[in-house]
Amino acid sequence: MSSTTRAWHLASRPKGMPTDANFELKEVALADLAEGWIRVDNQWLSVDPYMRGRMNDVRSYVPPFEVGAPLEGGAVGTVVESRSPHFKEGDTVFHMFGWRESVTGPAEKFNKVPPLPVEAHQWLGNLGLTGGTAYFGLLHVAEAKEGDTVFVSAAAGGVGSAVVQIAKAKGMTVIGSAGGADKCAWVRELGADVAIDYKAEPVAHALLRAAPKGVDVYFDNVGGDHLDAAFAAARNNARFAICGMIDSYNGGEPYAFRYIMRVIAARIAVKGFIYTDYLPLMGEFYRDMGGWISGGQVKSRETIREGLEATPQAFLDLFSGGNMGKMLVRL
Amino acid sequence: MSSTTRAWHLASRPKGMPTDANFELKEVALADLAEGWIRVDNQWLSVDPYMRGRMNDVRSYVPPFEVGAPLEGGAVGTVVESRSPHFKEGDTVFHMFGWRESVTGPAEKFNKVPPLPVEAHQWLGNLGLTGGTAYFGLLHVAEAKEGDTVFVSAAAGGVGSAVVQIAKAKGMTVIGSAGGADKCAWVRELGADVAIDYKAEPVAHALLRAAPKGVDVYFDNVGGDHLDAAFAAARNNARFAICGMIDSYNGGEPYAFRYIMRVIAARIAVKGFIYTDYLPLMGEFYRDMGGWISGGQVKSRETIREGLEATPQAFLDLFSGGNMGKMLVRL
């Protein structure tokens, strides 16, 4: 084992859409194992749209990444050395040390994954932040229930594809939007009752046609025209869970909402949320999601890029729809 | 007593800002009193921004006004003839028959006002739809509580001025926006900690300066730049009660929101509401508001126009800020 590893650093803060120049792969020292520390070699790295926000110099629900420092993010690896009584070599762990090959740190910064018979990368996908975001947003924020009509944007993405399947497992009618015929076909395969190709026509038109009686729930990953379409199509007392607004993460023109005034007449409840607020409910999530995965009601699909070098581009491709299902990097 | 009366009718549907030509004052027959009916002569008519929505041919939470039919709206009058055991001559009643001198109808369409020592027009103001909207929106929709910092737009209007005073009576810090120095001075007289003159500078700048630690609650009467400012200034878990968006009632360009993405990081909850949904809570409202009025914590101010002929212009003036406090027509 070497005492160094390679890690992606934030070289500079992006303005608008990030480029390769904002990232730098550097050799960094690995601290020796203190008492209670472990060393982990990563197998899987997660790239997620929310990370774009941390590249800005803005205090938000998590501090911004620092320029010149390694990028943090979800990763799954194997314990290769342990000075903690709680971990042994070979344990699979999830952690947030991010885009790097190896890491050493105090044991409490790592989570041993629960003993479920799933592939390791699922802990970054349907059983991780991605699936948890879908689960808590749909069922706890939007309080979606059997019989509801649910609209979810970016339905072919990691979070969106989980929302589609959870909603179907719970007996809801699901309308998913995605860009292009291939993605729409997959959204239907996941069980969606209707898939809307937002590249083919204005999403508000398609949504009103797909749901002439309106929607009870909107799960927002996109913002902009998708959120406006949901305002247009909302039934009385509709609930919107605002998970992401990928349309706006890289700047651009603010969106002019035509239908936002329907919030009043339809008594729409719009609520933003952050996955980590729901960590106390992880037990419920593992129980339900574990059951759906083993029962075949929730399937996963990944877009996998190979090698640490591929990480920034995998991240950038999230913003041009380059992924079907969860985007991952395999080391 | 004649068997006719005069009533304002919707002559045509406005496109954008209404004009005099959309309204017509006509003589109409008054139906004879059937068993169980009463006849009421109006003293006070209410003009309210929400009525603009009913002039469009759009089904909303209430049906649209019909072209050629009398306009409906809140009014207070005196029973002058009764064939109902529940009403006697001289009773003060509130009803929704609107912009007219007299009306006959079945007793169940009229509400005898509670026995509180207030002037009759209060039943259209702080003890009516206006005050009730403020009360339910602030305390039940936004769940504002002691210690919260509350931002309310159109704070010199009927609803807004009630929000300011209820919030102060409940121990909140209040920032109100209004157009011009006179209105701002009155908003401060009502007890607001800060009054923002939105005509003097962009409201987002003023709000962030007035509330450097942000706001917990926003009571929206305006939409557009005011709502966007509230997105910018929202603290974590802020609650927005969306009562009105007067900026948009007459059409115009949809507003491009710069700060709406903060819904996610700050976990903002935005909820539209309609006064009538809270009618089951009128007992609580009368108890609290009656107490505040008799205790001097809630004062009323009216902008009063004289005579039935003045009604459409009184309504139109709502959209150019022509009122301080509640706009009323006295017959």
Image (spheres, coloured by chain):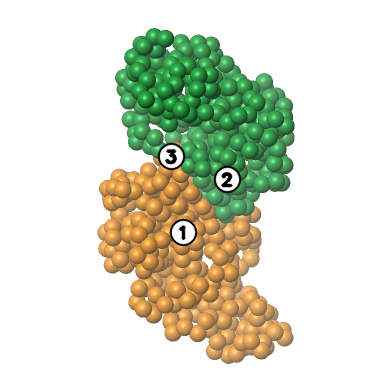
Chain colours: A orange, B green
Q: Does label 1 lie on the same chain as label 3?
A: yes
Q: Count all numbered tags in the image, as a single digit.
A: 3
Please state the horizontal and vertical placement of residue B314, each as a whole percent of the image. Answer: 50, 17
Q: Return the residue at label 2.
A: B140
Q: Which residue is mark 1?
A: A143
Q: Please name the residue shown 34% across and 18% down the image.
A: B31
Q: Of discs 2 and 3, which sits in the foreground?
A: 2
Could you tell me how far apart the alpha carbons at marks 3 and 1 are, in whole angstroms?
20 Å
- Name the kind of residue labelled 1 in the image: Glu
At label 3, the amino acid type is Ala
Of the pair A327 and B48, the residue shown nearer to us = B48
**Which dot marks residue A265?**
3
State left or right for residue B270 relative to residue B35: right
Q: Amino acid at mark 2?
A: His
Crowdedness of circle 3 by 10 Å Cα count: few (<14), some, many (20+)? many
The front one of B116 and A229 is B116
How far across and down, in percent of the image, does residue B24 sit? Answer: 37, 14
Q: Is residue B60 left or right of residue A312?
A: left
Residue depicted at 62% across the width and 32% down the height: B162
Q: Is residue A155 above or below residue B4?
A: below
Q: Residue at x 60, y 29 (%)?
A: B115
Label 1 vs label 2, nearer the camera: 2
Which is nearer the eye, B67 or B31? B31
Marks 2/3 same chain:
no
Q: Against A238, is B102 above or below?
A: above
Label 1, label 2: how far apart the Cα atoms are:
19 Å
In this rendered view, identify the residue nearer to me: A93 or B220.
B220
In the image, residue A169 sits, relative to residue B123, either above or below, namely below
Q: Is residue A50 visible?
A: yes
> Quick check: do tags 1 and 2 share a chain?
no
Using the rendered view, name the quadrant where residue A153 is placed: bottom left
